[in-house]
């Protein structure tokens, strides 16, 4: 590269660093080295909390999809609503839309502008018209100079037949193209520019022997080291079979104003993309993030019940052999169905990962219906050249348990965070509480006991009294929640040992007891309706002090369990797809409708009697009991664990 080219890239990096600093005080760019800002982490956290103070209706659960702001979808279909902050400070959302269902004729790519951080939007702006060839899966990028690029699939050869089949789905066929806007998305270049996609082994093996290529992308482009890049999926068979990962990289598009002169590389080098044969045909929806040491980190979905991940140390030219994604190197596997697993790098240099935290293997249908209903976030930090992931938190859920959000995007502006998502017929944007994200990023160092909402805190001496007055618990049917936090050592793992019991004569109340397969179980009842849930099997060991937290969350109506600082997710048990249980599940006509076939059974007040019996038949020692009148976040439960039983 010439000295002039290097200088231009250095200037680009400096401009990007300034943009990031303006967005996140004290933050660093993806390619800039860390600088001493003179702002302490505690002061920064306080500043962020101050900046993010918003008017929220009392009792409103920001995790509920219903609280989000709608993104325009007048045509009926809305997918991949990806949002960038343009040079004028407004939001520009690029999405795929159409009057039919996914993949039908008339599908095209559009944009919309918001001047109030997603609360209201402009009319849809065509990037490609509905009466042209199919245009789909648009992903936007804002360069440091302010130009906006939109990359998307384009059926430029108007392919609609395959052998004797006519009218085939064509939204993944054809060319990878882009247009640009120099007025923050209001208008788009008349000319579209085609990305050079070389024919590889995957293409030659497809139904058209490479004369037509099959691909799509869900990865919003990134900038690092003066380059722009994004990942996408090629398919080796029509349709959604033999997938593998590729990425485009350009080292001059961030500074080159003549779109005809932008240079692109298709990576990895050679004839084969990112994949491992042992994970099957379905390896798709690749997306990646840059790391501070120059590596690229990539994640994608499979039908094994787990996502896979891979690293590149040479800018995407070669990749490590894909492996199941784990929370730490060599550690517990992450669980996810055939659903988009999405990565982001925040302006503070830390990472976020969106997934669905269950072991279903198929789409969100049939036996896997509802597997996308709850979206979880995990926070990532770099250690020794790898990303370590926190225990996850619920970030979004739908009351219709058959439906769920997917294809999300992260938006950062002024120290605030939002996530966009879609349910295909409705797309929304949601502000995310900073304390949720800070909790994820700081789990490793959290060592304090949560105090807010604490109803009881009994040490070993007070526990020996055998009973206390039972505090009133919030009504679950009204969205209330509670948490039971225990430090316990069992001399015997036999089931049926009662640890806590507030039940009255009618059976109303809560019961915590040992159960089968070396587990603890919580049962809740309002006297008419009941539900119970166990921790994952075989986690508890005899004569070992364990920390067990039952989180009964009346928002998504979930009971989750954290054992020794690790959230139960069902493990690798194929018969236990979830590590959490839903105590309110209505039956709906379909996942696309809120029409009820059968209303959910409501569980209301589970306080029970006036007395809470403590360890009446326990073969072991209860060292600490805490009871809260709210759900603890996973990160708070982890902090309680790290604090130990004494505090």
Image (cartoon, rainbow, N blue to C red):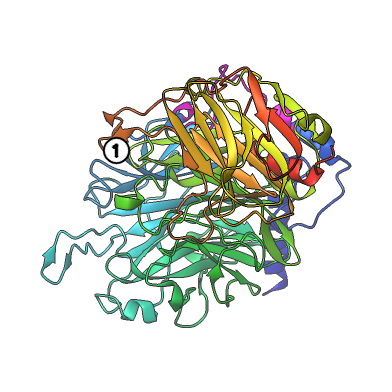
**Range of residues picked out in magenta:** 48-68
Task: Say which of 612 and 169 sits in front.
Answer: 612
Measuring from the top left, give residue 77's x and y in whole percent: 31, 41
Q: Above or below — where is 380 with respect to 53?
A: below
Examine the image and state in which quarter residue 617 appears: top right
Residue at 84%, 39% in the rendered image? 646
Measuring from the top left, give residue 250's x and y in whole percent: 56, 66
Task: Say which of 172 and 305 sits in front.
Answer: 305
Residue at 83%, 33% in the rendered image? 461
Say which element carries label 1. loop
Q: Quadrant of the C terminus?
A: top right
Q: Is 637 a magenta residue?
A: no
Res 167 visible: yes
Residue at 61%, 57% in the rendered image? 223
Q: Which residue is mark 1?
A: 592
Q: Above or below — where is 616 with respect to 489?
A: above
Task: Say which of 628 and 105 sits in front.
Answer: 628
Q: Is 54 a magenta residue?
A: yes
């Amino acid at each position: 590269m010439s000295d002039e080219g290097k200088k231009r890239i250095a200037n680009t990096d400096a401009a990007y660093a300034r943009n990031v600093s303006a967005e996140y005080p004290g933050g660093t760019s993806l390619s800039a080295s860390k600088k001493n800002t003179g702002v302490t982490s505690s002061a920064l956290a306080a500043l962020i909390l101050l900046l993010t103070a918003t008017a929220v209706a009392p009792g409103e659960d920001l995790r509920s999809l219903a609280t989000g702001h709608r993104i325009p979808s007048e045509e009926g279909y809305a997918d991949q609503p990806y949002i960038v902050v343009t040079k004028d400070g407004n939001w520009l959302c690029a999405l795929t839309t159409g009057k039919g269902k996914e993949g039908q004729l008339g599908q095209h790519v559009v944009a919309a502008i918001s001047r109030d951080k997603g609360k209201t939007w402009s009319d849809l702006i065509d990037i490609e018209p509905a009466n042209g060839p199919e245009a789909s899966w648009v992903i936007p990028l804002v360069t440091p100079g302010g130009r906006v690029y939109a990359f998307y699939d384009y059926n430029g050869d108007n392919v609609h037949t395959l052998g004797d089949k006519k009218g085939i789905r064509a939204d993944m066929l054809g060319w990878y193209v882009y247009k640009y806007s120099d007025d923050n998305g209001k208008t788009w270049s008349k000319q579209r520019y085609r990305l050079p996609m070389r024919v590889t082994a995957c293409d030659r093996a497809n139904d058209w022997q490479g004369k037509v290529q099959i691909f799509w992308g869900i990865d919003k482009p990134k900038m690092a080291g003066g380059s722009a890049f994004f990942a996408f999926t090629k398919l080796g068979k029509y349709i959604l079979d033999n997938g593998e990962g590729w990425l485009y990289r350009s080292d001059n598009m961030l500074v080159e104003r003549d779109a005809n002169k932008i240079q692109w590389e298709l990576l990895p080098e050679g004839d084969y993309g990112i994949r491992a044969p042992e994970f099957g045909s379905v390896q798709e929806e690749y997306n990646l993030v840059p790391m501070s040491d120059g590596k690229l980190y990539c994640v994608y979905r499979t039908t094994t019940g787990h996502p896979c991940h891979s690293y590149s140390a040479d800018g995407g030219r070669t990749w490590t052999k894909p492996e199941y994604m784990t929370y730490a190197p060599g550690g517990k596997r992450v669980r996810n169905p055939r659903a988009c697993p999405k990565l982001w790098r925040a302006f503070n240099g830390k990472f976020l990962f969106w997934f669905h935290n269950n072991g279903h293997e198929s789409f969100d249908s049939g036996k896997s219906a509802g597997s996308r209903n709850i979206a979880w976030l995990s926070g990532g930090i770099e250690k020794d050249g790898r990303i370590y992931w926190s225990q996850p938190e619920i970030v979004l859920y739908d009351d219709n348990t058959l439906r769920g959000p997917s294809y999300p995007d992260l938006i950062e502006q002024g120290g605030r965070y939002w996530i966009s998502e879609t349910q295909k017929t409705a797309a929304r944007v949601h502000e995310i509480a900073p304390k949720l994200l800070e909790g994820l990023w700081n789990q490793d160092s959290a060592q304090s006991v949560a105090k807010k909402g604490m109803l009881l805190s009994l040490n070993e001496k007070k526990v020996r009294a055998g009973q206390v007055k039972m505090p009133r618990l919030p009504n679950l049917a009204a969205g209330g929640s509670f948490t039971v936090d225990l430090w316990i050592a069992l001399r015997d793992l036999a089931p049926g040992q009662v640890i806590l019991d507030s039940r009255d004569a009618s059976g109303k109340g809560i019961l915590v007891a040992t159960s089968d397969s070396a587990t603890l179980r919580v049962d809740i009842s309002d006297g008419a309706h009941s539900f119970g849930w166990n921790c994952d099997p075989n986690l508890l060991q005899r004569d070992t002090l364990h920390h067990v937290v039952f989180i009964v969350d009346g928002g998504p109506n979930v009971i989750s369990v954290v054992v020794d600082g690790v959230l139960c997710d069902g493990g690798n048990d194929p018969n236990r797809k979830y590590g959490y249980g839903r105590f309110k599940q209505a039956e709906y006509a379909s996942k696309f409708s809120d029409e009820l076939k059968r209303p959910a059974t409501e569980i209301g007040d589970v306080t029970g009697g006036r007395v809470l019996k403590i360890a009446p038949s326990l073969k072991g020692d209860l060292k600490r009991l805490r009871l809260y009148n709210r759900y603890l976040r996973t990160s708070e439960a982890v902090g309680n664990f790290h604090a130990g039983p004494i505090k």
